[in-house]
Every structure is written in structure tokens, then in C-alpha cells.
Image: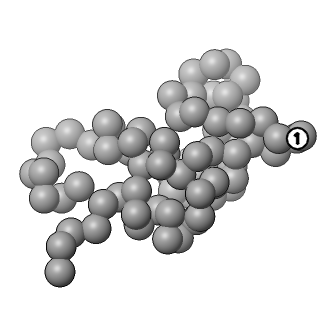
Amino acid sequence: MGRIKMEELLIQKYGPLMDLPEIAQLLKLEPKSIYQQIYRGKLDVPHIKHGKKYLFPTPEVACYLESKITNYPESFL
């Protein structure tokens, strides 16, 4: 059995889009912190505003997380 990429794991768990509470839970941050980062333009994760709701493309979240992981062997990702 080959290794499963982070993107595949996240899509299996969250589907193609994640909402703000899901990404906050994944990043272990309070949703309020995510809202503040969006408001200040400091959030590096691409997102879509749909009405009053923020949505995050799951593959982009996976790329963001992989870009933030340092000093781990390639087989970890």
C-alpha cells in the first residue's frame, strides 16, 4: 500500500471545500483568529466568500500545510 497524500486525506475527510470552523480546527486556531487574518489580509490560504460564509478549497489547504512543514522526510508527506 502506497502512502496517501495529505490532499487525499483532507478531501476524504472534508470534501472539496472546507468551511471556516473546519480549517480553524485543522490549524488548531480559534475561528475568530481566522476571521481576523482574513480581515487583515494576512491569511495565505486561498478562500472564497459565499454570502457570509468563507470556503477554502481543500487541495489549496493541503498545499498550504505542506508548504509550512519543514525538516520532515519526503515520505512523511
Residue 23 vertical position relative to residue 71 in the rendered view, above or below: below
Residue 7 in view of the camera:
yes
Q: Residue at x 40, y 63 (%)?
A: 8
| Percent coordinates x, y for residue 23 in the rendering | 58, 51
Residue 30 in view of the camera:
no
| Percent coordinates x, y for residue 48 in the rendering | 71, 36
Pointer 1 local density, CA inside 10 Å: few below 14, some 14–19, many at least 20 = few
Image coloring type = one colour
The residue identified by callout 1 is: 52
Q: Residue at x 41, y 39 (%)?
A: 64
Q: Is 41 placed left or right of 69 in the picture?
A: right
Residue 44 vertical position relative to residue 62 in the rendered view, above or below: above
Looking at the rendered structure, the kind of residue marked 1 is Lys
Q: Is 32 placed left or right of 67 in the picture?
A: right
| Percent coordinates x, y for residue 25 in the rendering | 57, 58
Q: Is 19 placed left or right of 77 in the picture?
A: right
* Residue sitting nearer the eye, 40 or 50: 50
Examine the image and state in which quarter residue 33 appears: top right
Examine the image and state in which quarter residue 42 appears: top right
* Residue sitting nearer the eye, 77 or 35: 77
**Residue most toward the right?**
51
Considering the numbered disc 1 on the image, is that residue within a helix, a strand or a loop?
Answer: loop
Number of callouts: 1
Q: Residue at x 62, y 45 (%)?
A: 56
Q: Residue at x 57, y 33 (%)?
A: 46
Residue 32 vertical position relative to residue 46 in the rendered view, above or below: below
Quadrant of the image containing the C terminus: bottom left
**Residue most toward the bottom?**
1
| Percent coordinates x, y for residue 1 in the rendering | 17, 80
* Residue sitting nearer the eye, 6 or 23: 6
Q: Is 73 placed left or right of 24 in the picture?
A: left
